[in-house]
Amino acid sequence: MKTTEQQNKPINGNDLIALGYPENEILGIALKINKKRNGYTKAEMLDKYAQVFSSPQDFLEDKIFKTLAKGFIDGIHLPNQDENLIELNENPTDFKIYGAEKIEDGALEQMKVAMKLPVTVAGAIMPDAHQGYGLPIGGVLATKNAIIPYGVGVDIGCRMALSIYDLPASHYFEHHDSLKETLIKNTKFGAGHGFHGQYKAEHQILDDAKFETNSFIQNLKDKAWSQLGSSGGGNHFVEFGLIDFKEDDEKLNIKKGSYLALLTHSGSRGFGATIAGHYTKIAKEICKLPYKAQNLAYLDLDSAEGQEYWIAMNLAGEYASACHEIIHQKIAKSIGAEVLAKVENHHNFAWKEIYNGEEVIVHRKGATPASKDIMGIIPGSMTAPGFLVRGKGEENSIHSASHGAGRQMSRTQAIKSLSQNKINDYLNYFGITLIGGGKDEAPMAYKDIHEVMAAQQDLVDVVATFTPKMVRMADDGSRED
């Protein structure tokens, strides 16, 4: 057992270097912070230093660590830069900002860096944007023949899927308990969790020839199979809600009225995350960018590595779609409903599209495709409505819209500042049945979806409004036992 003296022993530079800290001004800032321990033991401080090193964006509002976090994000005075670095364009074109007053400075700074890449053609940032890795969440970037793994994101092919049933809204209230049982029996959540043995799902995606691309992808097939039809942690969900059409929609062949619906949000699970990590590492080895742009390392689509990632990304997107399809089929069968219409869309992906008359690669990291007449789903929070939308094909947004309300609190901030009792009272007020979910996904952690939608009236038309009623998520926001 450690003594009090050992617990309070000063942290030195070697301790931080062992965590991966660079030997430069960052190290000095970190050691200066150590003088303000605020009651933390040495072990607790080292744990905090490790968290800041891996996720600096979560500490930008922390009283103790915000200076250090900003130092990491700004990439100040980092040594050992390769003399053969790819130069950034210091006079980039402007990018379109939607809902600027609600977007944090960190997200805007990340977008400014992305616009300086020599392969960048155009950019835009959506009103739900917040800081991420590489591109901000809510960032849209068009590039010339180049693909950025972190421009797509870690959860490749993360998407929304909506099934509208031939059941009236009243069915929810009349069958609340059986619907709850259906959600619990037919869904599985959490990082690293999946199905085994006789419970594994079958789907034609497992026969896709892209699984034979190379040994790396081949070796991920068992992981993909075990998690097929499951959902991730964090903000991923499966929920019943009520969807309201104010008028007939001829294109969907749905009459005016309110219906029971199922909405799901999840991506390509561990399969996609492993692909993202692997090809991001390769991109960083090939594409040497200045420190502040390193997470935007790109692969030329004419290169073998670029083609490998492109194939893997598309497979991960199709796999994510298959996961949703399995969930929706199981639940429709369980409740004995017919599906009147189904709509789905990616929001962590890259597409080949035509922009200003030339083919570009459009990265939408947390952004909904909104080309002319394309359908999409933009969720709010578990107590705020989501919207079934139809794109207007706005060129300035690179045919994109927001992918949700967007966070206004980091996960760390939400966990620290929100009480579970207050969250429960809030959910009860809105009549929400929550199965699982962590404090980091509390409705108060998200922006006002109505303000977000008001900022993008030029981008989409609202077709129907979806009101969540019963939400299932991972038990603590990341995993399920």
Image: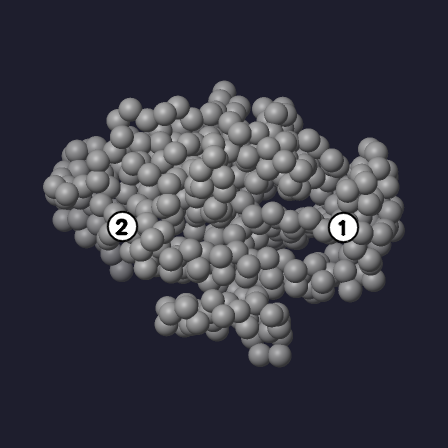
Residue at x-position 32% and y-position 47%: 298
In the displayed structure image, the side of residue 10 where residue 312 appears, left or right = right
Q: Amino acid at mark 1?
A: Ala
**Dot 2, crowdedness within 10 Å: few (<14), some or many (≥20)?**
some
Q: Quadrant of the N terminus?
A: bottom left
Q: Please tell me whether residue 134 is drawn above or below residue 156 in the rendered image.
A: above
Residue at x-position 51% and y-position 33%: 398
In the displayed structure image, the side of residue 479 where residue 44 appears, left or right = left
What percent of the width, then of the height, locates residue 255? 86, 41
Q: Amino acid at mark 2?
A: Lys
Element type where label 1 sits in the image: strand
Of residues 394 and 70, the one nearer the viewer is 394
What number is the disc on residue 34?
Answer: none
Q: Is residue 393 visible?
A: yes
Of residues 425 and 303, the one nearer the viewer is 303
Gap in Å between the C-alphas at discs 2 and 1? 42 Å
The extreme front residue here reads 357
Residue at x-position 55% and y-position 35%: 399
Residue at x-position 21% and y-position 33%: 76
Q: Quadrant of the C terminus?
A: bottom right
Give the mark, 2 or 1, whose residue is nearer the N terminus: 2
The extreme top residue here reads 101
Q: Mark 2 and mark 1 in contact? Answer it, CB < 8 Å.
A: no
What percent of the width, then of the height, locates residue 306? 35, 55
What number is the disc on residue 284?
Answer: 2
Element type where label 2 sits in the image: helix
What percent of the width, then of the height, locates residue 474? 57, 55
Q: Which residue is mark 1?
A: 341
